[in-house]
Amino acid sequence: MVSLNKSFLYGIGFASITWTISLYLYWQLNKTNSLGFSPTYSSIQDVSKSNLVFDAPPDKTVSRSGNYVNSPQLIKQLQSIRRSKLLNKHEKGLDELGMVKTVEDQRIRDEGFKLHAFNVLISNKLSLHRELPDTRNKLCKDIIYPTHLPVASVIICFYNEHFHTLLRTIHSIIDRTPKEFLAEIILVDDYSDLPNLGFNLTNFLNSNYELKQKVKLFKTQRREGLIRARMFGAQKANGKVLIFLDSHVEVNVDWIQPLLARVYNNRSNVAIPIIDIINADTFAYTPSPLVRGGFNWGLHFKWENLPTGTLSKPIDFINPIKSPTMAGGLFAIDRDYFMEIGQYDAGMDIWGGENLEISFRIWMCGGRLDIIPCSRVGHVFRRRRPYGDPDGKDTMLRNSLRVANVWMDAYKDYFIKERPDANNVNYGDVSERLQLRKRLKCYDFNWYIKNVYPELTLPTDSDVRLKNKWSALERDKFQPWHTRKRNYVDHYQIRLSNTSYCAQSTKDSKSKGSTLFLKPCMRSKNQIWYETDKGELVLQQLLCLQSGPTFPYLFKCHEMGGNQEWKHKGEDKTPIYNMAAGTCLGVDRIHLGTKLRMQLCTNPSLNMWDLVR
Ligand code: UDP
Ligand code: MN
């Protein structure tokens, strides 16, 4: 109720909750998905559809190094007639950006994955000012925010971030934040050692008047880790509100007002945007479902379905959603409040655990934490973190031990049971943090569980209790743009052009990991590929064809595009191109039993296929 009233204060034009809204809501609810999509922070999140606008790459057929490259014409043709109807105007460009055309492209791509764990080939070519799909609920557009919101300092720490991706982060903020709300962007270079990164960044910032005015670049004296680097940034900040962001994000339209309004409303409100997904393989931007933050007894953050009934009225889709924890990377907090409640635990190193620490502290010491659905910020979710602790320590474990010892009282034992290896880890001195807890007169962990996270399952829960807790949460994630059904739009054999060989799985078609080889074409089941409207190729309607670095193979369909998203012309003699790999299905010789590989899309006799219907 409280939130409802607040929304009215912001002046929502809700005089007409009419058919349109009810229908809209009904439509959304009916699209709920149960495919187990869960954007684990820092793990891969692929997607299938995107809206991207980009700078057109140069229209060349010969690269500077003289290599033959695919004509852009070829790429344009790589849309089957059937599928092209389903694609929007921006999406078609993604193939072109991702396509590996030369050996140099391949090198950039491979090196980029090693250093950054995402596709820098695409990031380099994408505009620094690319448009994003507006992923907000339509009702967000009707909200009128107070004009006198506090100004924010945006704080971005980075360690060895990919240059172009960092620039896009900065530009997205400049482009999509009303000037009056942005005091400054504070960049904290956490002692990066990538050659030229600092030099290039300084030059870039100096080259543009607006950037020069707004962006302040600092560098730490040594590698601090994201926790102390953020504290360092906060000391430099002048804005009334601090907004922490990662260095590989893109903020969406009107992202800042809902966060500022929430903090303005009460200085102990901490506000988190919905973290949309930027696919690490394709850079496609797609909305995240409405989920909240939780954790397990290993003290790993997890996304979790909302309590049953949270989204029952239209306004529930735009009101703040109470969250027991935050993912960590992105949030807004009043600067003085941040200082008052003890910033971060400066004894924590590099990465991990700090998100649960600040979440527990906010709730237990009198604040609150909510996800604000009308604020959307895209984040590149990578499969792995491309850096470690300089001393090779498991900082997540050490930091988590500090969390457990300061905040979790007797519940700490559950963590130790989950992580017996923690017993041998020296987690340093936490006496200052314990004093802080006392000084702030915080509630205990039992209070937190009872009042903030009653759905948290305990190792001691009986079966009945567990069942009750599970049923207290929605079974399905609320997914605005994804549909549950797999829609097949075509089926065919994949025959190497001018031969009588077809692509068939090496093991039986139910075996995950099975690669493909050339076999005489037969109308047998293990040669029949079903194409979906998401561009998947599903053998016998069971497993999806997925691109690997060298070979394509069968894998469980994940419904998130990227390495399971294929494009072709829909007619004979077509390349079959993979969106994530940037390469095509091919063979290195025409021979019975030859294994299919991922190859540059350039060899007409070895990667042209007929789709035999
Ligand atoms: N970061 C940093 N110093 C470090 C580790 C990380 O400044 O020692 C930065 C990193 O560049 C990123 C942010 O902290 O901007 C969060 O880290 P990351 O994105 O790796 O975390 P994830 O999103 O994978 O959880
Ligand atoms: Mn990140």
Image: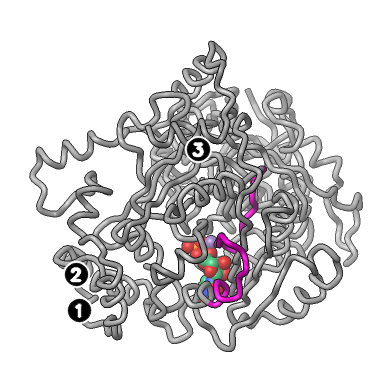
Please tell me which of labels 1 and 2 falls first in the chain: 2
Q: Give how far apart the Cα atoms at labels 3 and 1 are.
A: 40 Å
Residue 570 relative to residue 466: left or right: right
Query: Which structural element holds mark 3?
Result: loop
Q: From the image, tell me which residue sits under label 1.
A: 423
In the image, what residue type sits under mark 2? Ile
Judged from the image, the secondary structure of the residue bearing numbered disc 2 is helix
Q: Nearer the viewer, residue 505 or 340?
A: 340
Q: What residue is shown at x 48% (from left), y 51% (from top)? A: 271
Q: Nearer the viewer, residue 45 or 533?
A: 45
Front one among 118 and 193: 193
Q: Quadrant of the C terminus?
A: top right
Q: Which residues are magenta?
A: 232-253
Residue that mark 2 sits on: 416
Q: Are marks 1 and 2 in contact (CB under 8 Å)?
A: yes
**Mark 2 sits near ligand 1, with its Cβ under 8 Å away:** no
Could you tell which of marks 2 and 3 lies nearer the N-terminus? 2
Residue found 29% across the figure and 75% down from its top? 402
Q: Position of residue 173 (x, y in %)?
A: 69, 55
Residue 564 in the image: above or below residue 205: above
**Disc 3 target residue:** 559
**How many tags in the picture?**
3
Q: Is residue 249 magenta?
A: yes
Residue lying at 74% horizontally and 30% vertically, measured from the top left: 572
Mark 1 → mark 2, Cα distance in angstroms = 7 Å
Q: Quadrant of residue 35?
A: top left
> Disc 2 vs disc 3: which is toward the camera?
2
**Quarter in which the N terminus is drawn:** top left
Which of the marked residues, 3 or 1, is nearer the chain's N terminus? 1
| Type of amino acid under label 1 | Asn
Asked if residue 456 lies in the magenta stretch, the reply is: no
Q: Residues within 10 Å of mark 3 (few under 14, many from 20)?
A: many
